[in-house]
Amino acid sequence: MTRSNPYNDPTARRAFLDREARLRQLSDVERDFVRLGELPDLNRWLDQVRATGGCAEPVHLRGHSTTLDAGTGEVLRHYSTEAEPGGRLSVRCRNRRASRCATCSREHSGDTFHLVRSGLTGGKGVPDTVRTHPRLFVTLTAPSFGAVHRAGECHRARRRCCEHGGRHGCGRLHPDTDPLVGQPLCTDCYDYPGHVLWNAMAPALWKAFRDNLYHHLATRAGVGRTEVRALVRVSAAKAAEYQKRGSVHFHAVVRLDGPDGPAAPPPSWATGPLLLETVRSAAAAVALPPPDTAAHSGGRLRFGTQLDAHPLMKGDGGRLTDDAVAAYVAKYTSKSVEAAGAVDRRMESLAEIRALPVSLHVRALIATAWRLGGLPELQHLRLRAWAHMLGYRGHCLTKTRAFSTTYGQLRAARAEHASGLYSDRDSETVVESAWRFAGTGHTPAEALIAAGIAEDLATTREVAREDAEGSGRSGGVW
């Protein structure tokens, strides 16, 4: 049925104006729902949203892709976004932060789980024999920058006060959810510049720890520091976590391999007890000079005295299973500085920092990073760009090349499986494609629908998990 032209037909014009008047009485979200309901290809748009898992901030692309037989030039498949709603294709944002996109952060955590697990048990191109290699689960912490309130029994209350008039103790019992946990007992006593600079130098501290590990292994084995790298390889994967006080610490899996990587067994002298001993001594020996600035007069940068190292023996993980360790590391990749009560976006000015809805401690850390970032001698640390991260500019997860598979390989395998392209492996193909960026995000109504789809998918996974546990099957990683 064709609609009459409202410019020529008075009846059609009256109907059009009445409809516009009714639409003006609706909210922006309601008008957007009306627009969506009138889409001729609404079902296809919903299919795209489901395909992204209800991604909160999808990336829109325009273009085409053609798969050709390399020998004959025959077109095997052709796809173009011209037939898609709005002439574009939506793909996942792949943001690892749960605060930005819960569905993509869950997928990223799942990839991290398999990345770490393959380095512990094999698979994904890693031989199963890595189970027999010496392995440790290690936690490296930051030093103290001043007394802070602790969960559980806090510092014992004392009559003596600090030079600023603050009490030296608390004497209270804090639950984990208490907002006081991680806050300084005295903000004037707290070393804010030292805290920010330690976060900024944390990646360098990790590198120094790995270098020290080789040196200490060489000393224990009685070989030269250069020769040891031809005998044994230290493979590792680490995730960064923010403590409540805003300092970074590392959870890491450390493994000893032969010189050729995971396929080669380590030398007979490279044992689990030796690895445990050298990890402790190597971490204690880390001592880097702080950046040369008058804004901080502290001593050398070191790791904290609290170091946990748990052997993972005989493939069962001892007290910790391999799956539990992989899941423990993976969960931190979906978290970021918001775990410390900060924000996940960059700052533009001190005025913006002063207006942040955060604790006084976090605001002081961000402001300190901003002020230090303005010093010429600290420009190389890019502290203003990373002030919202409290100075830390490292990635949430890093690994050595030989530890296991990569995110790219995991995503490529998932994309291949999802598109059902395994049949093309018997023939050589050439892919010709051209894509261009066409925007990001949802309109208000689209965002609500995407959130509902994401919630439905999460509920479906939970029901499937409960069914698997009830039937005695392994729930696996969902």
Image (cartoon, rainbow, N blue to C red):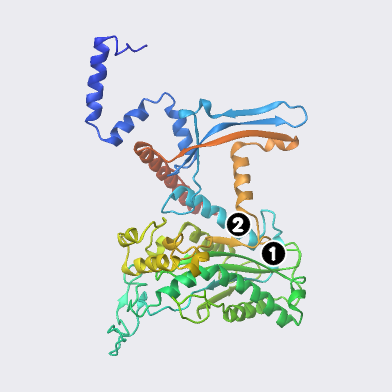
- The local secondary structure at tag 1 comes to helix
Work out whether residue 270 can be spotted: yes
Q: Is residue 234 left or right of residue 475?
A: right
Q: Quadrant of residue 226?
A: bottom right
Q: Quadrant of residue 424?
A: top right
Residue type marked 2: Leu
Work out whether residue 475 can be spotted: no
Q: Quadrant of residue 70?
A: top right
Quarter of the image for the N terminus: give it.
top left
Q: Is residue 286 above or below residue 81?
A: below
Residue 115: which disc? Answer: 2
Q: Dot 2: few (<14), some (14–19), or many (≥20) neighbours within 10 Å?
A: many
Q: Is residue 113 left or right of residue 364?
A: right
Considering depth in this image, is 273 or 447 the residue closer to the camera?
A: 447
Considering depth in this image, is 477 or 231 the residue closer to the camera?
A: 231
- The local secondary structure at tag 2 comes to helix
Provide residue 62's location: percent of width, then percent of height: 53, 33
Residue type marked 1: Val
Residue 130: which disc? Answer: 1
Provide residue 19's location: percent of width, then percent of height: 25, 22
**Do callouts 1 and 2 mark residues in contact (Cβ within 8 Å)?**
no
